[in-house]
Amino acid sequence: MKLSTNLVAPAVLSLLASSLSGVAALTASRRATTCNGHPELCDRSFGNVTFVGTHDSYAVGTNSVTVNQDYNITQQLNDGVRMLQSQAHNSDGVIHLCHTSCDLYDGGPLQDYLTGVKTWMDANPNDVVSLLIVNSDNLPPSQYDTVFKAAGLDALAYAPDSASLPASGWPTLGSLIDSGKRLVVFLDANADFSSVPYIIDEFTNIWETAYDVTDTTFNCEVNRTKGDTSTQMYLINHFLDKIVVGFPAPDPDHADTTNAVSGVGSLGQQVQTCAGQYGRNPNFMLVDFYEYGNGSVFQVAADANGVSYDPATPVATPKMGSSSSGSSSTGVTTAPANGAVAIQIVPMHLAASLAVIGGVLAGALSVF
Ligand SMILES: *[C@@H]1O[C@H](CO)[C@@H](O)[C@H](O)[C@H]1NC(C)=O
Ligand SMILES: *[C@@H]1O[C@H](CO)[C@@H](O)[C@H](O)[C@H]1NC(C)=O
Ligand SMILES: *[C@@H]1O[C@H](CO)[C@@H](O)[C@H](O)[C@H]1NC(C)=O
Ligand SMILES: *[C@@H]1O[C@H](CO)[C@@H](O)[C@H](O)[C@H]1NC(C)=O
């Protein structure tokens, strides 16, 4: 009897050992090996990665002072954008993504936009994506929560352990991906960690440089924060505006140089300035017309992250030719299929357009 137990024990132990190594192998195989396109990024903290973001990602169209992008968010994500910034407004009790005002530009319901993000993320399981939502009407986070749930996106959203984290306190991209919580959602105002923990307060976690800049200097001074800028992540607003009838508006004519890797007013130059000033690269770089520069914004991000960038990577082609302005339409109001209203302006005829947009812009600080 004693003999048989002695014989059984090693067998049990070896069975146990092999099943344990099976578990270990399973765990290892579930570990993401490529994160946001690069194996090197898997072990990097989310707070130590530079991401390209689209300013007003939902404001898509051509020849309008109210749009900031040529391509929709699906194309933006396909091309490599990993932060989508948007402006949320209350439109008769429904959250819509509008530009300054829903009368000026209505990009449709937040829920449709989030459904698009969900579809893309489901098809791209090794990517971490961030959303930055400007809460223009100070809506409660519970109202956003309802919309995230309706789009099924709450299930992918990462909830940190506390309301604010230093840059070094964020999980790695690999662990966000492995946990399935690979959407990071920031709200600029009214976030409430105790009620909706995955809707993260922006300014206690991120500081920003100035926005609506019309000067190609693009300095790196702190413009907005509610936290300790020495430890927070930071975001640079690298989109150049021009003044249109007294208000700042997007400037696609200079987007090639604004988005460039180097040169006066370029994204690459601002990153170098900021890195020199603070000893670390920006975490988020918000740009307009991201595809201008033929992928240069992604080259800047890759350089900042110390990973390779293949210049042959396909990126969408700009829709508006630089310095085109050839169109003769002035103040034409179009109504796209989704119900959005876009006001077309040709810079040469601004005076004639003044009456068209004047009423809408009255009271608004800017076309931000
Ligand atoms: C987004 O844009 C792409 C072209 O870049 C187009 O094929 C696709 O249908 C668009 N998606 C939506 C939801 O409009
Ligand atoms: C922040 O930027 C805005 C827009 O450029 C500007 O109006 C404001 O004065 C800046 N605030 C600070 C504190 O720098
Ligand atoms: C990540 O850390 C490296 C090494 O300290 C640093 O050079 C780089 O600027 C950091 N990037 C960000 C976005 O913090
Ligand atoms: C953009 O990049 C692609 C891929 O390298 C290249 O074929 C194309 O000529 C470039 N276009 C411009 C305008 O530089």
Image: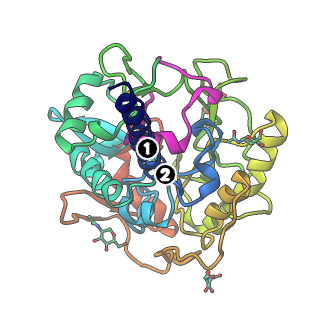
Task: Specify the segment rendered in magenta.
Answer: 162-188
- Visible residue check, residue 244: yes
Q: Residue at x 63, y 70 (%)?
A: 293
Q: Image check: 51 left or right of 151?
A: right
**Residue 56 position (above or below residue 12):** below
Residue 92 in percent (x, y) is at 15, 35
Quadrant of residue 234 in the image? top right
Q: Which residue is mark 1?
A: 178
Q: Image check: 31 left or right of 331?
A: right
Q: Amino acid at mark 1?
A: Asp
Quadrant of residue 232 in the image? top right
> In 3D space, how far apart are the residues under numbered discs 1 and 2 (Cα atoms)?
6 Å
In reply to whether residue 170 is colored magenta, the answer given is yes
Residue 32, labelled with which disc? 2
Q: Residues within 10 Å of mark 2 (few under 14, many from 20)?
A: some
Q: Residues within 10 Å of mark 1 (few under 14, many from 20)?
A: some
**Residue 195 position (above or below residue 72):** above
Residue reaching furthest to the top: 194
Q: Amino acid at mark 2?
A: Ala
Q: Residue at x 38, y 47 (%)?
A: 358
Q: Residue at x 52, y 69 (%)?
A: 348
Secondary element at tag 1: helix
In reply to whether residue 249 is colored magenta, the answer given is no
Name the quadrant of the N terminus.
Answer: top left
* Chain-order first, disc 1 or disc 2: 2
Residue 349, labelled with which disc? none
